Amino acid sequence: MHPMLNTAVKAARRAGSIINRASQNLDLLKVEHKSYNDFVSEVDKAAEAAILEIITDSYPNHAILAEESGTQGDSEFQWIIDPLDGTTNFLHGFPQYSVSIALSHKGLITQAVVFDPVHNDLFTATRGGGAFLNDRRIRVSKRTRLEDALIGTGFPFRNFDHLDAYLAIFRELVQKTSGIRRPGSAALDLASVAAGRFDGFWEFSLSPWDIAAGTLLITEAGGLVGDLHGEANYLKNGHIVAGSPKIFGQLLQTISPYLTEKLKL
């Protein structure tokens, strides 16, 4: 395992143990509202602090972009961290959340870890080295027809600017696929595409820390990732479509008629 990936795995597991411990005492947690429908608990903060400690101990000069503490440092290496993706699920005791850690080098994601602490599932990828779940090589699904596909998504929850376009796409995909699921942790949803559990995924208005690790998992597992136009701007604009190659193309085709000027960002 690449030493930088090893550091990310160690950090993700440490965060996972903090999250698992806290899940036993949810009623004691302090929770704050960051903004409408956007929560942060002391667990998010403790998990992030543990991740940062391990990473900065090994790589003190690397830059950091973390959900709770923002951007720190200036380096061609940047760690992109979501200490608890799926906080709302976690706070309700709904067991679907994850830790997401990615490393970007000169703007390119090179290492990725998504850790599911509930099931002890560790997804990892190094650019050019393939994607793995618990050390077993994973590939995107072989399904080729949208009507056979199980598609993941995330409902708009904080930014409702694109709600009408989202619902129009949702309405069409409900009728064109074998099912749509909304588990509530984008990082884990993207890992599920990489592992072939989902055949595709789409969502609007995500943050870089939600998707940085998951997108490398998918491309290393033989899948495709793009924004709503199939371009590589998803880390900047937060709009994402992903899937096995054939399903990715059919998702883009379905979404295309609903793109407004606003969604071209």
Image (cartoon, helix red, strand yellow):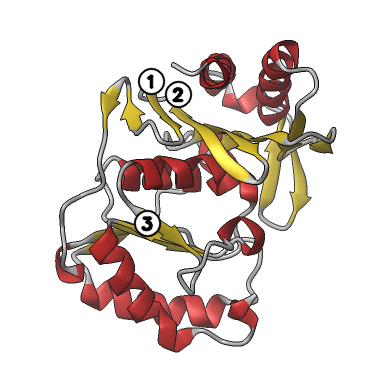
Q: Which of the marked residues, 3 or 1, is nearer the chain's N terminus?
A: 1
Left or right of 88 on screen, residue 182:
left
Estimate how packed mark 2 is, as few (under 14), some (14 to 19) or many (20 or more) residues with alpha carbons within 10 Å: many
- Label placed on residue 224: 3
For the C terminus, give its image quadrant. Answer: bottom right
Residue 217 on image: x %, y %: 41, 40
Left or right of 173 on screen, residue 166:
right
**Amino acid beneath label 2:** Pro
The residue at the point 69 percent across, 12 percent down is 58
**Mark 1 and mark 2 in contact (Cβ < 8 Å)?**
yes
The image quadrant of residue 197 is top left
The residue at the point 26 percent across, 24 percent down is 136
Return the residue nearer the eye: 18 or 60.
60
Q: What element carries label 1?
A: loop
- Say if residue 185 shows up in the picture: no
Q: Name the residue under label 1.
A: 120
Is 236 rendered above or below residue 45?
below
For the N terminus, give its image quadrant. Answer: top left
**Amino acid beneath label 1:** Asn
Residue 94 on image: x %, y %: 44, 37
- In three-dimensional space, the C-alpha distance between marks 3 and 1, rounded to whole angstroms, equals 26 Å
Q: Name the residue under label 2.
A: 117
- Label placed on residue 97: none
- Say if residue 194 shows up in the picture: yes
Residue 117 on image: x %, y %: 45, 23
